[in-house]
Image: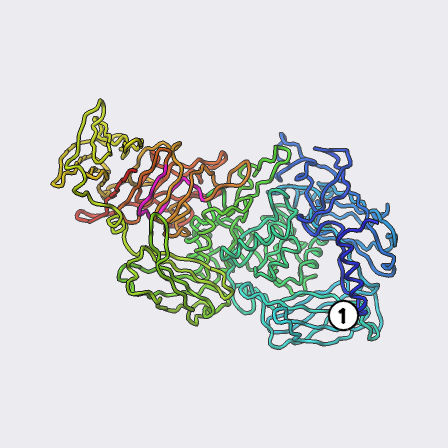
Amino acid sequence: MKINLFFLAFLVFSALSSKGQQTTSYQRVYLSGKDAASAVEWDFKVSDGRKAGTWSKLAVPANWELHGFGIYNYGHDHEKPERKLGKEIGEYKHSFDIPKDWKGKTIKIVFAGAMTDTKVKINGQSAGDLHQGGFYEFKYDITSLLKYGTKNLLEVTVAKHSANTSVNNAERESDFWIFGGIYRPVYLEVLPSNHFSRIAVDAQASGKFSALLQLNKPIKSASVEVKITDLKTGQDVKEFTAPLPETASSITADVANVKSWNPEDPNLYEAAFTLLVKGQRIYTKKERIGFRTVELRKNDGIYVNGTKVVFKGVNRHSFYPNTGRALSEANHLEDISLMKDMNMNAVRMSHYPPDERFLTLCDSLGLFVLDEVTGWQASYDTIVGPKLIKETVLRDENHPSVVIWDHGNEGGWNFANEKWFHHWDIQKRPVIYPWLNKNGVDAFHYPTYKAGINRLSNGNNIFMPTEMIHGLYDGGHGANLDDFWTDYMHNPRAAGGFLWALVDEAVVRTDRADSLDADGTNAPDGIVGPYREKEGSYFTIKDIWSPVQIKPMVVNEKYNGQLIIENHYLYTNLENCKIEWELKGISNWKAVTLSSGKQSLANTLPGESSRITLALPQDFAKADWLALSVTDPSGHKINNWTWPIHSANNFSNKKLTAPTEEDPASIAKDSLGEYLVYKANETAVYFRKNSFMLDKVVKGNHEYALGGPLITDGNKLKEVKQEVDQQGNQVIRLAYETYPNAVTWTLFRNGQLKLETSAPGSKTDTADYLGINFSFPEENVKSIRWVGDGPYRVWQNRLRGPKFGVWEKNYNNTITGYNSVGKLAYPEFKGYHANLYAYELVVSQGSFKVYTETPNLFFRLFTPENAPDANNNLKVAFPAGDLSFLYKIPAIGTKFHSAESMGPSSANIKNVGHNGDENDPIVLWFDFD
């Protein structure tokens, strides 16, 4: 007889348990895999699309499209007559064994999620009513349908689209991928004849403990024994016994000295409920709980354990490109780890309840959860809706991480169904309406900066956008988040917000040679790519939402080591956090650590600041930059900060070498056709005679087609002066009518080439960028290494995140958030980068270095391509040419809004000044290998 491995494990466990105790504990026996990574094959046939009409095998849990069956659809496809709307029906068969000694027990079959109308038969007989709703757990008592001591046949029919119109409107015609199949586990619950049918716990931060206990059938002379254990210490903290009426009872107790649950310190307890009948223990069910209290105080805030909370959150779909909505333990852990690493403390389930395991991990790892009943922009009716609310609450009610219920999304609600949340939820958690201003919470979606009359940050209700700063390709997420967050945190009614969204939801198309498909602009909304590749906004969010902030300060040669630490935690004192400093230097374009130290932070409560002094050595100014990082009490690095100690001018002067006596005594000058050629120390510099623009540089056998600076049309060359200075270096001075009014080239005897362009005057226009540009053939580029902020590119409204240091990356042509095959290469090579000190561009024929003396200079590497479907909000201006050195760069918008409407950091910076101002020219040094 062939026995499922999970079933075998159960038998072994049961045999061992029966020898040591009489009590029967709650047991699961999986008929499918526990998750997508451990799926079990069942017999399967699909009615339409690929592989239609033939019985074969399909892994369970899984979405059948990802295994070569049926038809792919995005939720908007019902609006597109050119796309076939798949309405397949999948049929499953699976045989399983039931031991003889299960007679007398209660056996239930549980489906954690099937899309969407599901009929279940056991041995040819119906297990119960048709279940409708694709994101919910449902179960049937199949005790009377089973054959004991032999094989049993499970037959399941799953219709991808529902016979209920409201289910299709709420779930199947939505802005996300529409899949089919049994995509979450299927298992048996093996229970004694008498057992608890429901255990609902309300454990308050005060230690007040209550539970609603329901029995599956009336029992006389029953009682319950409750044991509460601290899972961190293993110590029992409370034991008591209470009588039970025949069907249901509420019990209460006070538990002393409990440690409350919060996402910064997710203390968990186990509550073991043992059913006693006439004093005999017959059944034990354990619930993992956290003591915490949730309150919505109108016109004030959302409080957890008496602390007003600020949600730093993101919207998360249950999604992975290779498996759709069938996920694994590793998938859940990866997503939670990414959120925690970005210093998020909350996640909104969009737009349906998640896998049970995800909530369990949120409990233990620490995340606030907004648990959502589906309804993208249309609602369930009053027949199906109350059933699905009940299924959501009863499955998720004991998770301490679940602090709010979301009733649908953006109009996807039926107000008549709201009452069922609090009918079932004994904790009476707040019920909110994402997108709506209702029940005391203004959850408006995608506000622009300072939006709303008596709403949001200008209003009187608690405000908490449940979708904000919509990502699309490289727009949104980090762009202007600093503006929004600064504005929001000035208002005591702010409860935070949730970015849209965590992941680019590009699915593997098994019908298109395993290419990736994000359905145009509908699904590439993530902070991370489909395979969780980190985009630049990831690090911006991490920096802005860091629970430890360092007050802005200047670090230079005179720095005294003092800094002010701000505690932005909700619950954590900084006294158990540590700060580590490193003094970094540069050797052969590599970062080296010159010295380091670690010290504890001072006693600093949430919302407070403290001053500390770093124990830096007296000669710290020999280093190039100071790097700091802070770790939380568990040792996880919260964030890091960097400050260059010296100016770009100082750095360049240290790295550049002056001509020596061995260098040529003077510069050779030739006239070759259209060029004036200046030669020094094996370096030949070619200027065009008519424009005096650099055309190329030849060093030995290497030729570099570096052309510039590119002068805008209409900027007339007024005057040219050439001279040899006292050291024998060739100097060419060019005067123009408008910016750059003065351009000076100097070729030194050692072959180094210097360019200086005058600082812009006060009448410079408000172009998106300002500086100088060069042409250079992109096809020759192999890599770059640089000293400055990196490794990610920046926009004017997304400067936080990159850190000062020595960086290196190979050439790539990544279009952020857009790819048809495989993983994306990040960080992107192309685009704007900040705070240049120097770089070396490696090309096929050699390399050349650029140093600058100009502070806060941006540099641009070529022009990144736009995704084919990018809208105008995301099409950012780039200057002519390929390589640029700029005083200012443009901002980027979001999916729904232009940059200009998103906050002050997107404003087009005007150049201002007066005669006599000493402004910084752009000074560049070129050194060719």
Q: Position of residue 686 (x, y in %)?
A: 24, 30
The residue located at (67%, 48%) in the rendering is 36
Magenta-colored stretch includes residue 837: yes
Q: Provide the residue span drawn in magenta.
A: 827-842
Magenta-colored stretch includes residue 455: no
Residue at the extreme top: 673
Task: Please indicate, yes or no, whether residue 506 appears anywhere in the rendered image.
Answer: yes
Q: Position of residue 61 (x, y in %)?
A: 70, 47
Residue at the extreme left: 726
Q: Secondary structure at mark 1?
A: strand
Q: Quadrant of residue 843?
A: top left
- Horizontal relation, residue 65 to residue 743: left or right: right
Q: Quadrant of residue 774?
A: top left
Q: Nearer the viewer, residue 702 or 366?
A: 702
Residue topped by disc 1 = 274
Q: Residues within 10 Å of mark 1 (few under 14, many from 20)?
A: many
Q: Nearer the viewer, residue 717 or 455?
A: 717
- Horizontal relation, residue 387 to residue 854: left or right: right
Above-or-below relation of 363 to 36: below
Q: Quadrant of residue 623?
A: bottom left
Q: Nearer the viewer, residue 348 or 928?
A: 928
Q: Give the number of marks.
A: 1
Task: Please indicate, yes or no, whether residue 766 appears anywhere in the rendered image.
Answer: no
- The colour style of the image is rainbow
Q: Position of residue 660 (x, y in %)?
A: 18, 43
Q: Position of residue 901 (x, y in %)?
A: 42, 46
Look at label 1 and name its amino acid.
Thr
Above-or-below relation of 838 to 341: above
Q: Nearer the viewer, residue 732 or 271?
A: 732
- Horizontal relation, residue 847 to residue 325: left or right: left
Instruction: Point out the image quarter for the C terminus.
Output: top left
